[in-house]
């Protein structure tokens, strides 16, 4: 085996190893970071009742358990009459503070839209953006924008276009319904394509169906 072949094999082995370990390490980093962030919730517990005082050492993930318990108890509270009245009173108080009112109202509207409506961020579409002939992948967030549709005298929809590498940042565009091309790829596939800057591209639906059919064992 000549030196060129050895170098190619070495490179192939290195790439294969990176492809195995990179997703694992990235996943571990995200999980550890989230657990560390949730452990900050333990600061709300009196020092005498924290895990390091009770068992003698810190328990990673205890904050996540505490956060889950707090969320469940909050949900239990706000589903009864007294809890709803307290929430209404608290929202009225927050709505009297100018800056807090804007932030709280926006976040609440977004949360209610994403968690309550089954079609939010569930449909992947393609629109001509930022110019004609250049297409962007986006997510249909509203089937109709009534005032815009009325002003423009044709149905308009809202499409959220995520930025590459950072899906939490992006643009909201309102375009005519006739200019939107619906895609069959899933939200997860579209997110992978956007975050990887197009490196990971899902196959066409017919190609995926053929691959699935070939993978099925013969009866």
Image (cartoon, rainbow, N blue to C red):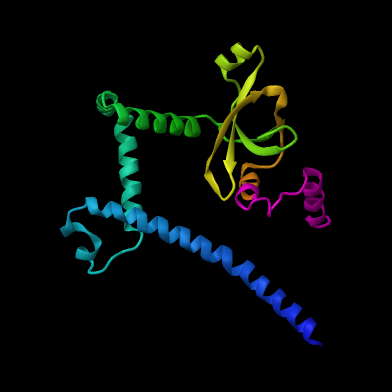
Q: Quadrant of residue 122?
A: top right
Write the residue at 31% across / 30% down: 99
Q: Nearer the viewer, residue 92 or 97?
A: 97
Q: Is residue 30 left or right of residue 55?
A: right
Tell me which segment is drawn in magenta. Answer: 193-219
Residue 161: name its quadrant.
top right
Where's residue 218, x and y in %? 83, 56
Residue 167 magenta-drawn? no
Q: Can you say whether 194 is above or below 174 in the image?
A: below
Q: Is residue 80 visible?
A: no
Residue in the foreground of this view, choosing between 184 and 97? 97
Quadrant position of residue 151:
top right
Q: Residue furthest front?
A: 131
**What's the residue at 45%, 58% (across, down)?**
31
Q: Is residue 121 above or below residue 69?
A: above
User: Is the C terminus in the top left, top right, bottom left or bottom right quadrant?
Assistant: bottom right
The spot of residue 92 in percent (x, y) is 27, 23
Measuring from the top left, give residue 7's x and y in whole percent: 74, 81
Which quadrant of the figure contains the N terminus?
bottom right
Which residue shows up at 69% across the image and 76% down it? 13
Please give the count of numbered marks on the rendered protein. Answer: 0
Residue 100 in the image: above or below residue 43: above
Relative side of 138 to 204, left or right? left
Q: Nearer the viewer, residue 17 or 4?
A: 4
Q: Is 198 part of what is drawn in magenta?
A: yes
Residue 205 appears left or right of 80 = right
Residue 4 can be seen, yes or no: yes
Residue 17 lies, in percent from the top left, at 63, 73
> Does residue 2 lie above or below 146 as drawn?
below
């Amino acid at each position: 085996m000549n030196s060129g072949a050895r170098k190619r094999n070495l490179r192939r082995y290195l790439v294969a190893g990176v492809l195995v370990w990179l997703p694992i390490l990235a996943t571990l980093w995200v999980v550890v970071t989230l657990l560390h962030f949730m452990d900050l919730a333990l600061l709300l517990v009196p020092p005498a009742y924290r895990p390091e005082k009770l068992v003698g050492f810190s328990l990673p993930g205890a904050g996540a358990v505490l956060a889950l318990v707090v969320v469940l108890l909050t949900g239990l509270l706000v589903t009864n009459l007294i809890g709803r009245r307290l929430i209404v009173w608290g929202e009225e108080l927050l709505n009297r503070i100018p800056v807090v009112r804007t932030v709280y109202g926006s976040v609440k509207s977004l949360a209610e839209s994403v968690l309550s409506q089954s079609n939010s961020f569930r449909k992947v579409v393609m629109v001509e953006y930022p110019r004609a002939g250049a297409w962007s992948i986006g997510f249909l967030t509203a089937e109709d924008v009534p005032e815009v549709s009325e002003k423009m005298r044709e149905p308009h929809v809202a499409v959220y276009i995520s930025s590459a590498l950072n899906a939490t940042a992006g643009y909201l565009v309102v375009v005519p319904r006739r200019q939107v091309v619906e895609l069959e790829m899933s939200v997860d596939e579209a997110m992978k394509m956007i975050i990887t800057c197009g490196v990971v591209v899902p196959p066409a639906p017919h190609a995926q169906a053929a691959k699935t059919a070939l993978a099925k064992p013969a009866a």
